[in-house]
Amino acid sequence: MKVVLVSTFENYGGAAVCANRLMQALSRQGIQVELLHLLEEKKKFGHSSVLKSSMSRLGFWIEFIVERLKIWIALKEKRHLYQFSLGNGSVKLRDHPSILNADVIHLHWVSFSFLSIEEIAELAKLKPLSWSLHDMWPFTGGCHYSFDCKNYESKCDDCFYISRTQFVSPSQIITKKTNVWNAVNFTVIGSSTWMGRSAYNSTVFRNKKIEVIGTPIDTEIFKPSPEKQDNELYTILFGAVNVQDERKGFKYLLEALNQFKKSIPEFQVIVFGAFDDELNDLKDVEVEQLGSIQDVDELIAVFNRADIFLLPSIQ
């Protein structure tokens, strides 16, 4: 069997990490698997970038800039520029040799002006297609996460992101997704019960087959080891790609740690990811900042130093 995984990014972000781990798990089972990605970061075996020519790269960047400009004009708050996508894309994968030779197509995160709504439908016409959801965009009117809003369960009217609907119309986007994707068959995969249930309740996917399958973790690699020293303080670990994203719940982390000081006065916090001045509000606590971690062995060592890992994400 030949499986082709499709992801916007090769390595950057959680969705790309999940795609790579799935690729490794499938390979160990003797399945021939390839990862097709939009933007090349590192040349790896079994990975292929779809933007080969300078013309194709130019076409993509023009499409991307036009989409972002429309969104920027329409947004109520400009800080949400990358939390909304239209579903446009300049890349045509339907004639790509890897797609034509595959038995199964497995989509991951394909936003960032990669695959259009129509192109996803065209791929579903060619081969059995499954789609792992790494955010809510596939079934919303354009937002990647809806927070408390559940308008995606109906028509996506009155969007809290968008003010100028003459440039961007969430209701038109959700109607387009529903009409185009109802005409083809594919399987939707949620990596959590919450994501699967949200997709099931949506207008777009309520007639689709939905499965809940967790992301594979190699427990021969990610496992406990005696890294922690006996004399080391009680250690709390937290990490996020972008701590300023409200979804990561950083303000709840600060509240929790300030409460924690009442019961355990001496402890340390290890953080990895992108931080600026956010940790200044944490007084009288030893904080070790590691920055971005790319090396798997380093990540394993960090987790093994911790007594507890805190995940305050709200979605």
Image (spheres, rainbow, N blue to C red):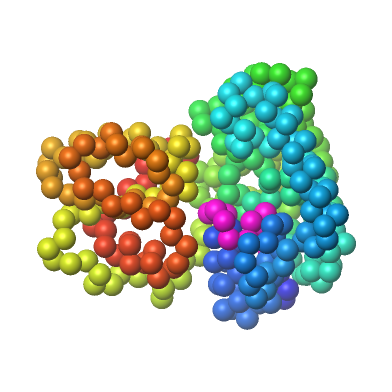
Placement of the N terminus among the 4 image quadrants: bottom right
Depth check, front residue: 47 or 146:
47
In the rendered image, residue 9 lying in the magenta stretch gets the answer yes
Counting the numbered discs, the total is 0
Bounds of the magenta span?
5-15
Q: Does residue 230 appear to the left or right of 303 in the view shown? A: left
- Quadrant hosting residue 168: top right
Q: Does residue 195 appear to the left or right of 163 in the view shown? A: left
Does 261 sit above or below residue 69?
Answer: below
Q: Residue at x 47, y 48 (%)?
A: 241
In the rendered image, residue 244 lying in the magenta stretch gets the answer no
Percent across and percent down for residue 231 are 12, 63
- Quadrant hosting residue 145: top right
Q: Residue at x 35, y 34 (%)?
A: 251
- Quadrant hosting residue 305: bottom left
Q: Does residue 89 appear to the left or right of 46 in the view shown? A: right
Residue 206 visible in rendering:
no
Residue 231 visible in rendering:
yes
Q: Residue at x 62, y 33 (%)?
A: 81
Percent across and percent down for residue 209 are 67, 50
Percent across and percent down for residue 30 are 63, 81
Q: Residue at x 77, y 28 (%)?
A: 172
